[in-house]
Image: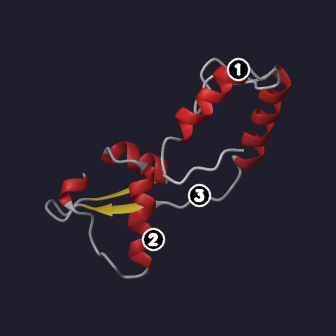
Amino acid sequence: MEHREEEGGEIEREQYYIDLLEPEYNILKFAGSSLGHSHSELTKKRMSEARRVNSGRKTVSIEVLDLETGIQTVYSSIGEASRALGVFKQVLFLILFQLRGGAIQTLPRSWV
C-alpha cells in the first residue's frame, strides 16, 4: 500500500508496480487496459447465455420530432435512435432523464 497526497496518476503508479514486481497472478500486463486478454471458452459461453436471457427484456420505443420539418420518427430502442441521430446512447439517456424532470423540452440542434 502506498499513501499519496496528490490525486491522479493512479494508472501510471499501478503500471510501475506491475513492472517492478512482475506479479505471477496478474492476468493483465498493462494497467487500465484489457489489451492482450482473451476470455476462456467457458466464459464466452456464459456471456452468450447471459445475453440471450437478457435479450427478452422490455424495450422502450423513442419518438423523435424534428421541429424544423415536423417529421416524427419512431425508433424501437435508444440504440437505434442514437445510431440514426449520430449521438451516443448516453446522451439520449441524459436527455430522457432530464425530460422526466422537465429540465429540457427539446434536443439542442448542436447535439444532432
Splitting the image into 4 quarters, where does residue 48 fall? top right
Q: Nearer the viewer, residue 57 or 28?
A: 28
Count residues near mark 2 (Cα–Cα under 10 Å), then give few for <14, some for 14-19, many for 20+.
Answer: few
Q: Amino acid at mark 2?
A: Phe
Q: Secondary structure at mark 2?
A: helix
Left or right side of 16 for 46: right
Left or right side of 31 for 99: left
Q: Secondary structure at mark 3?
A: loop
Mark 3 or 1, closer to the camera: 1
Q: Amino acid at mark 3?
A: Thr
The numbered dot on residue 59 is 3
Mark 1, residue position: 38
Give the residue at x 80% y 37%. Answer: 49
Q: Secondary structure at mark 1?
A: loop
Mark 2, residue position: 97
N-terminal label among 3 and 1: 1
Splitting the image into 4 quarters, where does residue 107 fall? bottom left
Give the distance between the C-alpha atoms of the residues marked 2 and 1, in whole angstroms.
36 Å
N-terminal label among 2 and 3: 3
Mark 2 or 3, closer to the camera: 2
Q: In this orientation, does residue 76 appear?
A: no
Q: Are marks 2 and 3 in contact (CB under 8 Å)?
A: no
Give the residue at x 65% y 59%. Answer: 58
Splitting the image into 4 quarters, where does residue 22 fall? top right
The image shows residue 102 at horizontal and vertical percentages of 36, 82
